[in-house]
Amino acid sequence: MSRDLKTKDMKILRCLRKNSNQPLTDIARETGIPVTTIYDRMRLHDKEIIRKYTILLDFPKIGYHAKTKIALKTGIGSKEKLLKFLTEHPNVNSISKINLGFDFFIEVIFRDQEETHNFIDQIEEMFQIEEKHVFSVVDEIEMERFLGKD
């Protein structure tokens, strides 16, 4: 990929990170790249580097006031079962494999802290949780910022 092409791709990706729903004509106007080129580049990158188009929600405005991030370390026999449980649970927003002795770092969204505590109690009862660190998100200052700002 040539440097010029990389620059075009980065301009397109930056626009999409700011608003993935904006019309291609707006992206063309902002970047100076022809609409047909933008369309071709997006198709080329679709599913390759663009994993999905999504929206960011203001969870408290829809009644979900408890966002919590949890680092979990589980026994070897529980790891796959816990992962299956987490991927199927409707309140789990994200799951990452992490290092430093932990297996997973998850983000959960619930209506209140009581629901969050019930969830934590449930996974401790169902799985061999060896260690956990729980972080309640008090205020989100910025999210999904990388490549979204000029």
Image (cartoon, rainbow, N blue to C red):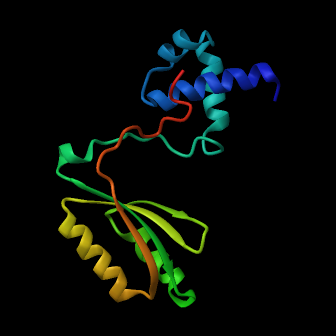
Which image quarter: residue 58?
A: top left
Q: Is residue 35 above or below residue 65?
A: above
Q: Quadrant of the N terminus?
A: top right
| Residue in the picture at 26% in, 68% down | 116
Of residue 66 and residue 4, the one placed in the foreground of this image is: 66
Which image quarter: residue 66?
A: bottom left
Residue 128 placement (x, y as % from top left): 45, 88
| Residue in the picture at 42% in, 86% down | 127
19 left or right, relative to 3: left
Q: Residue furthest right?
A: 2
Residue 142 placement (x, y as % from top left): 40, 37
Which image quarter: residue 140?
A: top left
Of residue 43 and residue 33, the one placed in the foreground of this image is: 33
For the image, the number of numbered tags is 0
Q: Is residue 121 above or below residue 48?
A: below
Residue 36 placement (x, y as % from top left): 62, 17
Of residue 1 and residue 98, the one placed in the foreground of this image is: 98
Q: Quadrant of the C terminus?
A: top right
